[in-house]
């Protein structure tokens, strides 16, 4: 099953539900972030890989949760090698500005975010198993 998940392609509507953003937001992000280049089906439908979905979730986190600008998020993704950092490694808003501070434990905000993501993933898995 892990191979099936890695090979799965997600339609724009599925990605919108996963990331909780509108389709026009994803289309805009494609123009701003080179790491997002979904393939297209024969009918022209955007098909996102699992890696691209992870990048989208990281972009959303950078922009909405951590307060980065588009330019700042681009730079951050470049330093991460366009591979999204796990949410547990994301600095909390209170420590992001200080390089001297390092968190030994994930912040409560990160833990709440992780719990929310886990719940959403369980819901997605349940929907996929129903199909």
Image (tube, rainbow, N blue to C red):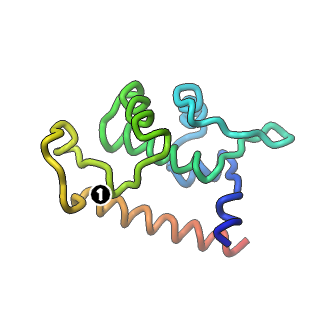
Q: Residue 32's x, y, as percent?
A: 52, 26
Snapshot quadrant of residue 103 = bottom left
Please provide percent x and percent y for residue 41: 81, 43
Q: Is residue 124 left or right of residue 40?
A: left
- In depth, the one of 4 and 63 nearer the eye is 4
Q: Quadrant of the C terminus?
A: bottom right
Give the residue pinned by disc 1.
Answer: 110
Q: Residue at x 57, y 30 (%)?
A: 34
Q: Is residue 4 above or below residue 65?
A: below
- The quarter of the picture where residue 107 lies is bottom left
Image x and y of residue 12, in percent: 66, 45
In the current view of this chain or complex, which residue is farthest to the left? Answer: 100
Image position of 40 with respect to 91: above or below: above
User: Looking at the picture, does residue 125 appear above or below residue 75?
Assistant: below
The residue lying at 58 percent from left, 66 percent from top is 124
Secondary element at tag 1 = helix
For the point 67% across and 39% down, the residue is 38
Looking at the picture, tell me which residue is in the foreground, 38 or 112. Answer: 38
The answer to whether residue 123 is left or right of residue 119 is: right
Q: Is 99 placed above or below 10 here?
A: above
> Is 102 situated left or right of 42 in this image?
left
Pick whichever, 126 or 37, lies toward us.
37
Figure quadrant of the N terminus: bottom right
Residue 96 occupies quadrant: top left
User: Which residue shows up at 29% across the image and 57% down it?
Assistant: 110
């Amino acid at each position: 099953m892990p191979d099936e998940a890695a090979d799965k392609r997600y339609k724009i509507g599925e990605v919108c539900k996963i990331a909780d953003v509108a389709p026009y937001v994803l289309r805009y992000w494609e123009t701003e972030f080179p790491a997002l280049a979904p393939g297209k089906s024969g009918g022209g439908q955007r098909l996102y890989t699992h890696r691209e979905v992870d990048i989208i979730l990281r972009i959303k986190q950078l922009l909405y949760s951590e307060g980065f600008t588009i330019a700042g998020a681009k730079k951050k993704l470049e330093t991460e090698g366009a591979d999204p950092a796990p949410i547990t490694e994301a600095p909390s808003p209170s420590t992001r500005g200080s390089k001297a501070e390092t968190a030994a434990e994930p912040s409560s905000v990160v833990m709440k975010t992780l719990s929310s993501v886990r719940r959403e993933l369980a819901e997605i898995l349940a929907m996929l198993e129903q199909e």
